[in-house]
Image (spheres, grey):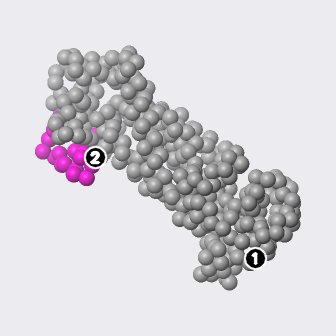
Amino acid sequence: MTKEWNDNLQKNDFETIWLSEIADKSNNLSLVVGRIHFDVFMKFDYLPAAEEREMVHLQSFARARRIVETCRKFWKEIGEEIKSICQAENDRILLHPINNTLKLNLYNTYELQIDNINIEVLWTENGFVIIENLEALEKRLQTIKKEFKDLKINQIIEGQVFQIFEPGQYKKNKEPKGVFSDFKIEKLSSYFQISEILSEPKTFMMLIPADKTMIIIEKIKEKYEKEMGKVSQRLPISLGVVFANKFTPLRSVLDAGKRMLDRPAPLVKADVMVDIKPDEGKWISKFKSDKFVSNEINGLLNEEIKIKEMNRILNFNFEYPVSFEDGQEDVFYPYFLTCPDWITEKA
């Protein structure tokens, strides 16, 4: 894998495989997980053109395929938006030896040490590639040594004499491999501070810098409300975040994310404290009120809803599109789903 990564170093759109490059300036990262609950859609699917909108199961392969492809496109576009947010500030740095006498294992990771300060690197045929977030590395070096204050990473590294160590295993000391001093600094391509773990129609997992987490969660929420708001009550989405330090074992982070994905989307029955007048015998309702406000930014309508659940009254904004792109009213999808007792019994 490290050789494949090295072969793609000159590609500007290449992701990273190193947790230290994904981590933010404080050496923290996060795992964003998302799941679109197809199982809920299958329970509450309906035929919008039918005179009697009875609950039916998902029987059409073509219909199921359209849902799957729409969700696949949704996560793919989310991945592209995340890339634009998580572009690394600095290009990678290569420490190219002028007279190479080192006998090291190709594509192995090592640590360059200066005054007990470790720098994570990968040894390639061209020299050492620093595999850390350079902003975080610069901040750490400036904090530990006062003489590095106000210096950029290139200025700090230039002319230094490094001890080379092979990373130690559990309860084993690091093994020294020599000294590295005669080199020149070269810039490599930029990269995205992300690592896509999983992207399929149903589930999504991606490692990102911790300081970008809330921006990305808001982007996913905004895109979901705009594109899937019409079916949000029958095709719900759940999102989760696992925050961790870059030294946290990746297995533990992924295990926590997997447990989030395994959580079901429970059906909760609550009384809506607004005057909804559903058609008699129908379980789908469309309603409008004087409270509707047009949101010109994303073309959605916004309704403040009050619900009563377990002796609590909760306020929330219910936001969804009610027209097609050409401005015509969409009469094929419900604005809100009412829930008679017979639905609760079958759900």
Q: CA distance from mark 1 to mark 2?
A: 58 Å
293 magenta-colored:
yes
Residue at 27%, 41% (x, y): give it: 320
User: Which residue reaches farthest left?
Assistant: 290
Residue at 58%, 42% (x, y): give it: 197
State which tag comes first along the sequence, 1 or 2.
Answer: 1
In screen coordinates, is 301 left or right of 123? left
Taking the image as drawn, is residue 249 in sight? Answer: no
Which residues are the magenta region? Answer: 287-307
Taking the image as drawn, is residue 261 in sight? Answer: yes
In screen coordinates, is 176 left or right of 88? right
How dense is the environment of label 2, judged by Cα within 10 Å: few (below 14), some, or many (20 and up)? few
Picture disc at residue 317? 2
In screen coordinates, is 196 left or right of 333? right
Location of residue 270 by image quarter: top left
* Secondary structure under the numbered disc 1 in the rendered image: loop
Amino acid type, residue under disc 2 in the picture: Asn
Cβ atoms under marks 1 and 2 closer than 8 Å: no
The number of discs equals 2
Amino acid type, residue under disc 1 in the picture: Gln
Residue at image mark 1: 160
| Depicted 231 relative to depicted 144: above or below | above
Q: Nearer the viewer, residue 189 or 286?
A: 189
Q: Position of residue 342 (x, y in %)?
A: 30, 19
Q: Nearer the viewer, residue 298 or 248?
A: 298
How dense is the environment of label 1, judged by Cα within 10 Å: few (below 14), some, or many (20 and up)? some
Q: Position of residue 194 (x, y in %)?
A: 55, 52
| Depicted 158 relative to depicted 50: above or below | below
Q: Position of residue 54 (x, y in %)?
A: 27, 17
